[in-house]
Amino acid sequence: MSGVYDELLRRWPDSGWLAQTIRLAEHRLQDHPHGDLPRWREALDCLPRVQTRAVLDRPTPSLGADAADPGALRSLLMELHPWRKGPLCLGGAAIDTEWRSDWKWARIAPHIDLAGARVLDIGCGNGYYGLRMLGAGAGLVVGIDPTVLFVMQWLACRHFGGDLANFVLPLGVEELPPGPAGFDTVLSMGVLYHRRDPRQHLSQLKTLLRPGGTLVLESLVLPPGQEEDLLLPAGRYARMPNVWAVPGTARLTGWLLEAGLRHISLVDVTPTTTAEQRSTRWMRFESLEQALDPEDRARTVEGHPAPVRAVLLAQA
């Protein structure tokens, strides 16, 4: 898979930060030890050749002309299970992902201007939001996610969509070179509560933005009425083992201010429901349904407040 990011480097050739990041990503992809990687690569190699095309300005981005054998295509794409962010349509195959990511995008899109923007998407998954951002006018989207399966899913999207300006690199945010990086917009969605030091994460995000750039932060928060509070789960939260802190929205705003970000606005607070996050044919593992108390859907199985997510915007 050498050269998979050559096109990315051509799109921003004068960025030393990006060149260094690409070298890290290529090394990670080349030497990744995951035992399923040969199977995933074989599935990618067997994808049918169709005319590439991309229709991105819709809840379900559509990539590629329809494959001649829909059943065979679905079987190949199922080799890349689980599909978590979407929905997507690849070669005519409709992929009903765990998350209705289009709902989250609908909460964010009215509040940001991406015309020509260079965007960094942290925790990007398979690049779904990158496709939506290109559809909203972004010039370049660089996504990072340490889960190599999501890079394989992105490569499947690229097989059908062609050389789109949307890239997924197999890196965690802690592996990124120090800024400045010069992005117009940085997204951190569903990441903050997985960081042991959320304040440090916010400070790092600021260094990745150009002066005046926009941070889009989406995170778990405590429900209305607990704006100043902070939950530090002693064990799991909604069956997740690595949730370190869930703040109230006022507490989170304070953290952003401490990181040197300004013009902070809270643009959305929405409880997560089992209609938005659920098991499907394309994600057959347990999902939110199993993480909630069956007797009290306002609580997790551990007794914590059920998931509520907020979107905040801030400027560097």
Image (tube, rainbow, N blue to C red):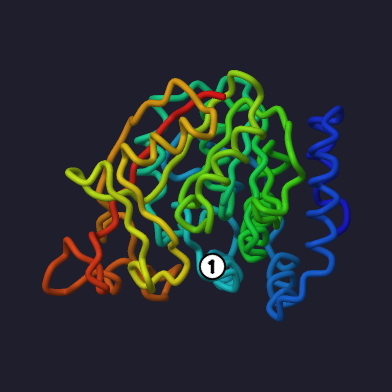
Image quarter hosting the N terminus: bottom right
Reading the image, the residue beneath label 1 is 74
Disc 1 element:
helix
Is 214 situated left or right of 60 in this image? right
One can see residue 279 in this view: no
One can see residue 107 in this view: yes
- Residue at point 52% right, 43% down? 188
Residue 273's spot in the image, x, y percent?
Answer: 25, 56
Image quarter hosting the C terminus: top right
Is 96 situated left or right of 90 in this image? left
- Residue at point 56% right, 51% down? 123
Closer-to-camera residue (309/2): 309
Closer-to-camera residue (253/112): 253
Closer-to-camera residue (178/5): 178
For residue 55, above or below residue 41: above
Residue 105's spot in the image, x, y percent?
Answer: 41, 39
- Residue at point 86% right, 30% down? 13
Q: Residue furthest left?
A: 295
For residue 260, above or below residue 33: above
Q: Amino acid at mark 1?
A: Arg
Residue 135's spot in the image, x, y percent?
Answer: 53, 31
Residue 16's spot in the image, x, y percent?
Answer: 85, 34
Is 203 situated left or right of 241 in this image? right
Quarter of the image where one finds residue 117: top right
For residue 216, above or below residue 210: below
Q: Residues within 10 Å of mark 1 (few under 14, many from 20)?
A: some
- Residue at point 38% right, 74% down? 235
Is 235 situated left or right of 41 in this image? left
